[in-house]
Amino acid sequence: MKVIIAKDYEEMSAKAFEIMAGVVKSNPEAVLGLATGSTPIGLYKNMIADHKENGTSYKAIKTVNLDEYEGLDYSSDQSYVYFMRDNLFDHIDIDLANTNIENGKASDAEKECERYNALLETLQQDIQILGIGSNGHIAFNEPGTAFGSVTHVVQLAESTIKDNSRMFASIDEVPKRAFTMGLKNIMNAKKIVILANGANKAKAVYGLVKGEVTEQVPASILQLHPDCTVICDEAAAALIK
Ligand code: PGA
């Protein structure tokens, strides 16, 4: 596991972009595993600026996203499918048909998980971008999730509902359940870049980098990945220095 400590959010995002650009430029048909949340927005801004300034093309790029709230789809601006279009896809030349995310409104949740797992079998991520929850979750794999898990529906932890309530009008509006790639799907990526910024991530970053590898800290599984880079800002790195 490689650890890069950046001085701030901008530098963290720029360093993540360098790795992402390397993947996209060396393979214009790469499969990108993407994440939502506040953390990767700076990376996506760098990708958009590079596309506009240097013409880097995403025409043949495919994407798979980590997770989606149950009950939400593009008609809700809180959905992750909406987030991806708003923060990245609508600003680059990607073919939306090549972008994939769980359908939060699927009528049969189990079938939807099967569909997504089968899809992931055919779309191994050349790079997977991750954020980390303050409780050590990656995607919506909350503490206690089996390391062997694949795409499934989860009950969100109280801490996650609280963390994410800032995006909603009130905490009551945060969905209680979500679809998420499992830890096995994430570990299948050829390369992983996990980003963290802010003091509220310091404890989780400690567990990610220096803690015991345990299902109680889902991100700790990344210590076992052969090509994982952690990029965090000074505040998030406070306990690992
Ligand atoms: P954040 O979420 O980027 O909004 O902090 C990260 C996560 O919960 O994985």
Image (tube, rainbow, N blue to C red):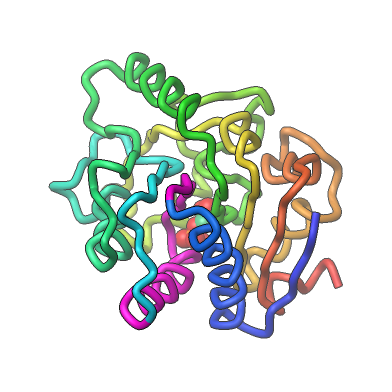
Q: Position of residue 36 (x, y in %)?
A: 42, 55
Q: Which of 139 and 4 lies nearest the eye of the viewer?
A: 4
Q: Quadrant of residue 216?
A: top right
Q: Position of residue 163 (x, y in %)?
A: 47, 57
Quick one: quadrant of the N terminus?
Answer: bottom right
Q: Is residue 121 rendered to the left or right of residue 204?
A: left
- Residue 170: tell me if it is visible: no
Q: Is residue 207 rendered to the left or right of residue 7?
A: right
The furthest residue to the left: 75
User: Magenta includes 216?
Assistant: no
Q: Say if 111 sits above or below 47 in the image.
A: above
Q: Quadrant of residue 204?
A: bottom right
Q: Position of residue 234 (x, y in %)?
A: 71, 79
How many labels were placed on the picture? 0
Q: Is residue 126 rendered to the left or right of residue 79?
A: right
Q: Position of residue 84 (x, y in %)?
A: 31, 56
Q: Say if 14 sits above or below 22 in the image.
A: below
User: Magenta includes 50?
Assistant: yes
The residue shown at (73%, 44%) is 222
The residue shown at (57%, 31%) is 185
Q: Which of 42 and 78 lies nearest the eye of the viewer?
A: 42
Q: Say if 108 sits above or below 233 in the image.
A: above
The residue shown at (39%, 35%) is 178
Q: Quadrant of residue 187?
A: top right
- Residue 210: tell me if it is visible: yes
Quick one: quadrant of the C terminus?
Answer: bottom right
The residue shown at (37%, 37%) is 176
Q: Say if 4 sits above or below 210 in the image.
A: below
Span highlighted in magenta in the image: 29-53
